[in-house]
Image (cartoon, grey):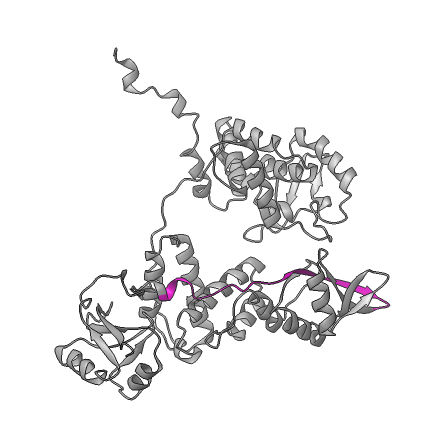
Amino acid sequence: MKEKTTIYLNKRRHASQHIWFVLLIFDTNEKIEERIKLNDWIIYNPYYGHYCTDFSQTSIDLLHDLFSDIAMVNTQFLDSIPSIKTNEITISTESYFKYPLKSKEKIGDILLLPFISDNTKFIIIKYKPNAKITNFLEQTKLVTWGKEIKAYFFKGTRTSLMNFVKATTPVLKIKLHHKLQLRDATIMQLIMEQSYVKTAEYKSCPLPFLNYLYLKNYSASTILTYHYYVLRFINTYKKTNIMGINKFGADHINKYHEIMTQDKGFRSKTINQSISAIKLYYKIITDVIIDDKLVFRPKREKTLPVVWSKKDVAAVLQNVPNLKHKVLLMIVYSAGLRIGEALNLKISDINSERMQIRIEQAKGKKDRYTILAKSILPLLRKYYTKYKPTEYLFEGQFGGKYSDSSARNVLKEAVKQSRLPITGGLHTLRHSFATHLLESGTDLRYIQGLLGHSSSKTTEIYTHISNAHLQLINSPIDDLEI
């Protein structure tokens, strides 16, 4: 005889109304869900991803009677705290919110480049040798092989690009060359969401929101960030359609971020970015007015950036055998650049006469100048002679900007080869640059200008890291005769 499914009851309290209710937690079961649909006093709670009803002895008795023929109602965990496991059922508020977007595996990456021939626009497809990618492209019948350019291509029209993206994103990961500028929200939506599994419950980020971001000329990184956090938010509530989500208020937003905060993987900076994205979404897309005073932002952690000593930086750079990679990391450290600024550098931005590097439209869409180190100039010239970049100082295999992921991997491997007990990434080189300048006596105002900080308060953090003044202080234990 087959055992009945068990429905576990778990008591919760509404965050704002202070009303108790009961969650019904059970393995997926069509009979139970059909029975629930016939009883409107049991409703689906999107916060927790489970059905619920009000907490009273009468309701509990009714649940016993309602499911007596198809399920066992278990109350032993009625007053339990989250994270109690029974028969592989987790009673927890976090599981529903933790992984709303699932990544989909692809057979490979392709790069789309613009190409003009006889005043006609085309798009070329570049990728590393891969038989699976070649077979797939041939089967789509959307591309043509070009003997002269030795690559597949298709016409550079919106319709052709749309058809190609729709056909390939389920299988291939599409990357865009920097010269292929797309402001079409529909196509960009497909490309930005290409990595996720599209279940029946999956919801795409509404196009009017993306259109607004493009219309307001938000930076590419801000569009990607805001798109991701809105996409994550709307896909957390799997059984609520977009019209229902658009009616949410401050309580839903607070509860969503409260649970994100409980997960140690989400820091206050991430939560604040998510809040900004979601608030903008409701402002632009819905008629719901979200009162700023009712949306709670977490206080940012007071943390100090990781800084390497000059000796550590030298050891890491010595373990980069590739000339191109070494020059890239040396530029980042010697000029205090963000990695995006280094990868955006063009050949014309290097001024060897004035020993300056021009940073164009950096964070905050501001231009600035920083220093070009004397010691790096000979190596930079050697690199230029060998690699012959055509536009960007650091270019990828098929032209265009070098990728930040490749740069991160270069540094990661160098740290590994140095065998030093240090942690940090590319931004650590920038932090180290600022700290080392401060320790050598450089005025904080000059450092602020070199880093491109709008506020001196941002730069002042390096005064807390600098070791120069600490070395002048003797501990009182040094005066003791022990």
Of 173 and 477, the residue lying toward us: 173
Image coordinates of residue 150 in percent, x first then y, are 82, 60
Is residue 61 found left or right of 471 in the rendered image? left
> The C terminus is located in which quarter?
top left
> The N terminus is located in which quarter?
bottom left
Of 413 and 163, the residue lying toward us: 413
Q: Residue furthest left?
A: 57
Image coordinates of residue 108 in percent, x first then y, are 64, 60
Q: Is residue 55 visible?
A: yes
Give above or below for 99 relative to 439.
below
Give above or below for 171 relative to 461.
below
Residue 63 placement: quadrant:
bottom left
The range drawn in magenta is 96-119
The verdict on residue 101 being magenta is: yes
Residue 347 placement: quadrant:
top right
Image coordinates of residue 133 in percent, x first then y, are 69, 63
Is residue 57 found left or right of 274 in the rendered image? left
Of 120 and 76, the residue lying toward us: 76
Give above or below for 274 relative to 44.
above
**Number of marks in the rendered image:** 0
